[in-house]
Image (cartoon, grey):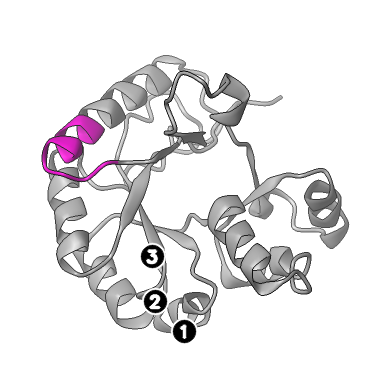
Amino acid sequence: IVFGDWSSDVCSSDLVQAYYAVKANSAPEIVNTLYDAGASFDVASIGEFRLVYENIRNLPAKERSAYIWDKIIYANPIKDKATLQELNRYRPLVTFDNLAEIHKVRKYAPQAGLVLRIRVPNTGSVVELSSKFGAAPSEAADLIAAAADAGLVVEGLAFHVGSQCTNFDNYIQAMTMSASVMEEAASRGFVMKLLDIGGGFPAP
């Protein structure tokens, strides 16, 4: 995940933050070890969120809240009512990709921050996710505006080039599309602060 504090006095290591996808292996020993090492976490279910939360349960309230906002992202664009109601008290960042999800978040988790997932090329990836998740880039600025009208804040964008992606051009196109969306959003008064570049990195 690349964060958008682009001032010249910030070194590049402050701009990039790696998030462990808990769904890859949710063994508590792994999650706990990564937490101790200072990792951030990508969760896709309420169970995964609870697993990470166990590590910060006893932190002071302010520190715990800051950790959730900065180091956990709920990356499933579609969430049920019960999940949103439970997440609301923690004020996390959650992804979305459609108008209906904005209305659900507004109703059941109004304290959450939003990250808009956009649809990008998945050409050559073993598992193509673009047919399942992601808003069309041409609709992105309108969705960001709709979220603002609903009293919600969109912190940034997210994409996923597909699992086991061996086509590097997918990343180039996705970055270019994201930049265009960010520029359009900024021209309408909505400044994006982060870009979640997902996973997809191939491994034997």
The amino acid sitting under disc 1 is Ala
Within 10 angstroms of label 1, few (less than 14), some, or many (20 or more) residues?
Answer: few
**Residue occupied by mark 1:** 82
CA separation in Å, label 3 and label 2: 13 Å
* Label placed on residue 78: 3
Q: Position of residue 109 (x, y in %)?
A: 39, 76
Q: Tag 1 or tag 2, which sits nearer the N-term?
A: 1
Give the residues drawn in magenta, as a range: 181-191
Q: Position of residue 94 (x, y in %)?
A: 43, 60
Left or right, residue 71 beside residue 127: right
Left or right, residue 60 beside residue 107: right
Q: Position of residue 177 (x, y in %)?
A: 26, 27
* Label placed on residue 3: none
Within 10 angstroms of label 2, few (less than 14), some, or many (20 or more) residues?
Answer: many
Q: Secondary structure at mark 2?
A: loop
Q: Residue at x 36, y 58 (%)?
A: 114
* Label placed on residue 109: 2
Q: Is residue 61 above or below residue 77?
A: below
Q: Is residue 113 above or below residue 189?
A: below
Q: Nearer the viewer, residue 111 or 6?
A: 6
Q: Nearer the viewer, residue 105 or 118?
A: 105
In this rendering, does residue 66 appear at all? yes
The amino acid sitting under disc 2 is Ala
CA separation in Å, label 3 and label 1: 12 Å
The amino acid sitting under disc 3 is Ile
Q: Tell which tag, 3 or 2, sits nearer the viewer.
A: 2
Asked if residue 188 lies in the magenta stretch, the reply is: yes
Within 10 angstroms of label 3, few (less than 14), some, or many (20 or more) residues?
Answer: some
CA separation in Å, label 2 and label 1: 10 Å
